[in-house]
Amino acid sequence: MSQFNQQLELARKRQHRMYLWLLTIFVLVFLIIVTVIFASRGTRVEVQPDDASDVSINAESWLAMVILDSVYSLAESTQIQVTAKGFYPLRKTIERADTGKVITVTLTPLPAKIILSTSLDDNLTQWLIDDEIIAVANHLEYELPAGDHQLLAKHPHYQMTTLDLTLSRGETVTRNVELQPLQGEFVVNSVPSGAMVMVDAVEVGKTPLTVPLQGGFHDVQLTLQKYETTEETIEIKNPSPTIERNYRLSAETAGVRLNLQPSGGQLTLNGLRIDNQDRLSVEAGKQHRLHYSKPGFFSKTETFTLDTNEKRTLDLTLQKEMGKVEILSTPTAEVKIDGKAVGNTPIELELNAVPHDVQFSLQGYRTISKSITPTASEPQKISVTLLPEAQARKAEAPRVYKTKAGGEMALFFPNDIIKMGAGRDEPGQRANEFLKQVRLNRPFYAGTHEVTNAEFQQFDSSKSGDGKLPITNLSWLEAVKFCNWLSQQEGLTPVYQLQGNQLNQINSNADGYRLLMEAEWEWLARKAGKPEQTLFVWGNDKTIPTKAVNIADESAKGSVKLYVPRFYDGYTGIAPVKSFDREKSGLYDLGGNVSEWTHDSYSLTVPKLDTVYPQVLDTSTIAMRVIKGANWRSGSLSELRASYRDGAELGRDILGFRIGRFLSGGNE
C-alpha cells in the first residue's frame, strides 16, 4: 500500500473514532436527561397573575433542568428565577419535599413612571393624581401602578390642565406640560374719578376702568393732580381671577424725605412710634417733632413746620456713642469681649455703648462671664475674683442628691486626720486593727444608706428580695460592677477596669462611683459630725442608745454565740434601710444592720506609726478586700467597735455595701 493510501486509511480511522466519541457523549447526556426526568418527579411552577406574559423559568443548578413549566432536579434544593415582562424578577427555592407538587409563584408588577415638566421656575405647580396632591414643583417624577389615571396640573396663575394617562407595567412616560395663562380682570374705581391708572409701569386708562390681566402679580399706581399717589400690588389668581378696587384718593399734603443713618433704629413722630420709611406725609402749618434713636448711638431730634405742599429733606444721621471701661480681675486673667481676645487684666478700653459679653479665663480656674453696657456719661468698671476650678465645684456641688438608681448621696468636706485602728490596750482589739494615720482632704460623696435590693435589681434583674432591704450575698466584684454600671448611667468615668470576673486596674483619677475607702468609712463612723473621735459609732459609752443600731439583741439569744443582753432593737434579722436614727455623720446604719465591703485590699502589712498617709485610692488588684462595720448578728465588744475590720473575697448573708465617689476626678 502506498504511503498516500496509508495516510488516507489512518484519517478514516480517526474520523470513525471521533464519531464514536460523539455518539458516546450524546448517549450519556441523553441518559442523564432521561435519568433526571424518570428518577425525579417534576415540580410544576404556576405563575401568577394570569396575565403575566413572556414568562421564563430558569434553574440555577446543573443538577436541575426546566421543561415547559416544570422543574426536574436531583439536588436537595434548587433555586429558580422566574421572570416576566412588566414584573420584578423573583427567586424561589424548591426543596426535595416539593417534588411532584404544584407551587405558586406570584410576581410583583413593575410600576409605571411618569416624568412631567413645565417651563415655569416658581415651584408653585400642584400635581394631583386621582384627586390627591402628590407634589408641588415645576418638575415631577413619580411611580404609580399600571392602569388608567387622571392627572391634574394646577397653578395659581395658570389654567388647570388635565391629562388622562393609560400606563403599562414598567412603562416610562415623559411629557412637557404647557400651562395656559389665567385670564382675569382688574375692575378699578376711584373717588374722585379720572385718576390715571398704571399697571406694571404702563398707562392703561383713567378710572372708572376694567383692565384684562393675565394671572400673576401686577404693580398698580393711581395718580391725579393735587392728590397723593396711591400704589398697590395685586394678584390675579385662581379661583377668583377678577379683582375689584374702589380707591378713595387723599388730598396732597406736606411731606418730608428722611435720611436715616444707620438703619434699623427707632423713629417716632410727635411721640408716636412709626415704621422707618423714606417719606412722611404730615399736616401743613403745624409743628412736628421727629426723634431717631438706636442703641450704641447718640439719638437725634428734629423739629419742623411745613407749608402746604412743601417738601423737605431731613438728615437724621446718628453719631456712635463710646464709653470707657476698666476691666480688673484677681488673679490676672485673659479677657475676651464678645468672643474676641483683647488681652490680660488689667485693661482699659473704649467700647461702643451697647451690651457686651466680657469673659475672664485662666487655666485651672472657673471661667466667669459678665455683661456690661458702656456709656459716654461716665466710665464703667468690672472687677471679678476667679475661683480655682476645684473650689468652684465645691461651691456649686449639691450637698445631697439622688442617683439614677434611687440611692441618696451626701457630700463631705473633710480636712482632718483620722487615727484608724486600735491600740493593744483597747478592750476587744484584734491583731489586724493596725494603728494608721490618714489625712482626709478631698471632698467625697457617701451613700446615706447601704445599697438596697431595689437599686441593685435595676443593674441585675436576676437578684431578688425586698426592695427596702440592703442587698447581701454579693462578692466584692459584684459590688464594684454595680458601681461601674451606675457611673455609666450618669456619664461618669468608671473607677474599676474589669475583664469578665477579673479586676485588671483601678483608675484613681476617675470621678465615678466606687466603694468607700477604709479610711473614709472609719472617719464617717468615728469622727464625722463629732467634737472628737469615738470608740463606737454612737460614741464612747458602752451602753447602746435606743434606736441606734441593728445588732444581735435579746431576740438573737440561742441563734448566735454572743448577743447584747437587755437590749432590744425591734428586728430579729436585717432591717429596711433608714429604720434607725440618723448617726452623727448624717448617715444610717454604719454601726449595724449589715457589714459593708470597702474599696481597700486586705493587708496585714503594719503601717508606719510616724507617717500620715494621703487620701489616695488603693490600686491593688488582689482578691481579698476589707470588710467594715457590725451587723445584725454582731454581739461582741470586738465587732461593735468602729475599728473592727475583717477580710474576705466572697459574699455573706450579713454583708452588703455602701457607695461613694470623689466630688471630681484627678488630684483636687
Image: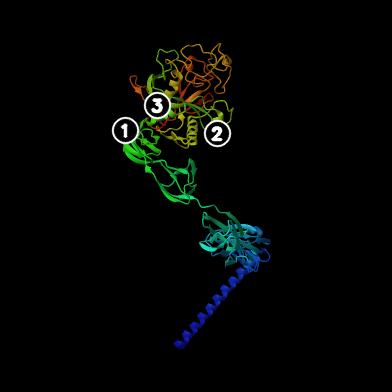
Whole-angstrom CA distance, mark 3 to mark 1, is 27 Å
- Residue type indicated by callout 2: Gln
The image quadrant of residue 43 is: bottom right
Q: Which mark is in front, 1 or 2?
A: 1
- Residue type indicated by callout 1: Thr
Q: Closer to the N terminus: mark 3 or mark 1?
A: 1
x, y percent for residue 589: 51, 21
Q: Residues within 10 Å of mark 3 (few under 14, many from 20)?
A: some
Give the residue number, with chain letter if any, for mark 1: 332
Q: Which mark is in front, 2 or 3?
A: 3
Q: Residues within 10 Å of mark 1 (few under 14, many from 20)?
A: some
The image quadrant of residue 249 is: bottom right
**Image position of 540 with respect to 140: above or below:** above
**Image position of 398 with respect to 140: above or below:** above
Q: Residues within 10 Å of mark 2 (few under 14, many from 20)?
A: some
Q: Which mark is in front, 3 or 1?
A: 1
Q: Closer to the N terminus: mark 2 or mark 3?
A: 3
**Image position of 412 with respect to 57: above or below:** above
Give the residue number, with chain letter if any, for mark 2: 458
Label 1 close to label 2 by CB (< 8 Å): no
Residue 442 has which mark? 3
